[in-house]
Every structure is written in structure tokens, then in C-alpha cells.
Image (cartoon, helix red, strand yellow):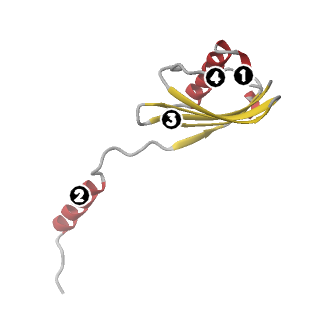
Amino acid sequence: MRRSSPAAVLLVAVVAGGAAGVGGAATPATKTCDVTAKAQQLGPSYVTSLKVRGATCAAGVQLVRAYYRCRVRAGGVRGRCHARVLRYVCHEHREGISIQFDATVTCTRGTSRRIVHTYTQNA
């Protein structure tokens, strides 16, 4: 039986570890932020969820408020924001009836920062 030297084992581990890192930096983990205490204080009638990747929850809350202000400037609570918000590009999907709708807003800044929030708006 042939025994490997500690140096050879170390070399194999370094090469394998380096190969695992090929392909760029790791994507930051997505974090779910607790907005239950602030659900009715962020602008829309109810903010139901907030998830961030590559940003803090505080930055996510700030973006939710800024996005709401942009919507209101663009046509009241039913308005849609088409401008950049805090240097993020946002897209919104809505479903609902004439007096209330639910929306999912996805905002990205570059390839690593992403903030997604959902809300319910009473009209």
C-alpha cells in the first residue's frame, strides 16, 4: 500500500479548493426581513413581505418607502413607478379587484443586489 505524504495531500486540497472557486464570487444569500411590526407604516396599506440579497433589511425598508412615494407621485395609490428608485430598477406585478390589489415588486441594482417586497393596497 502506498502512503501519501502530508505535502501531497495539502497540494490536492489547495488545488481542489481553488477549482471550486472558479467561476466568480459566490452569490450573497437572500435574507427575509421581519416587517410585521411595520407592516402598516411603510406607505402601502400593508407590506406583507420583504426579502433582500446583497443589501440590508434597513436598505430594503428605505426602498419600500421610496418606491411608494414614487408611485403616489405618478398617480396616487394606484400609480405606477417607472423611474429608478435609490439607483434600483424596479418591476411590479399586480393582481386584484377594483378596490384592492396585491403586488410584488422586484428591484435590482447590478447583478448582486436584489430587493423584493409584496404589499396590499386598498384603493
The residue nearer to you, when weighing 56 against 67, is 67
Count residues near mark 2 (Cα–Cα under 10 Å), then give few for <14, some for 14-19, many for 20+.
few
Dot 4 or dot 2: first in sequence order is 2
Residue 32 is marked as none
Residue 98 lies, in percent from the top left, at 81, 30
Q: Amino acid at mark 2?
A: Val
Q: From the image, which quarter does the N terminus lie in? A: bottom left
The residue at 73%/27% (across/down) is 38
Q: Helix or strand or loop: what does disc 4 sit on?
A: loop
Residue 78 is marked as 1
Dot 3 or dot 4: first in sequence order is 4
Residue 82 lies, in percent from the top left, at 55, 21
Residue that mark 3 sits on: 114
Q: Helix or strand or loop: what does disc 2 sit on?
A: helix
Residue that mark 4 sits on: 80
The residue nearer to you, when weighing 74 against 39, is 74
The residue nearer to you, when weighing 29 against 66, is 66
Q: CA distance from mark 1 to mark 4?
A: 7 Å
The residue at 68%/15% (across/down) is 75
- Residue 118 falls left or right of residue 111: right
Dot 3 or dot 1: first in sequence order is 1
Residue that mark 2 sits on: 14
Dot 2 or dot 1: first in sequence order is 2
Q: From the image, which quarter does the C terminus lie in? A: top right
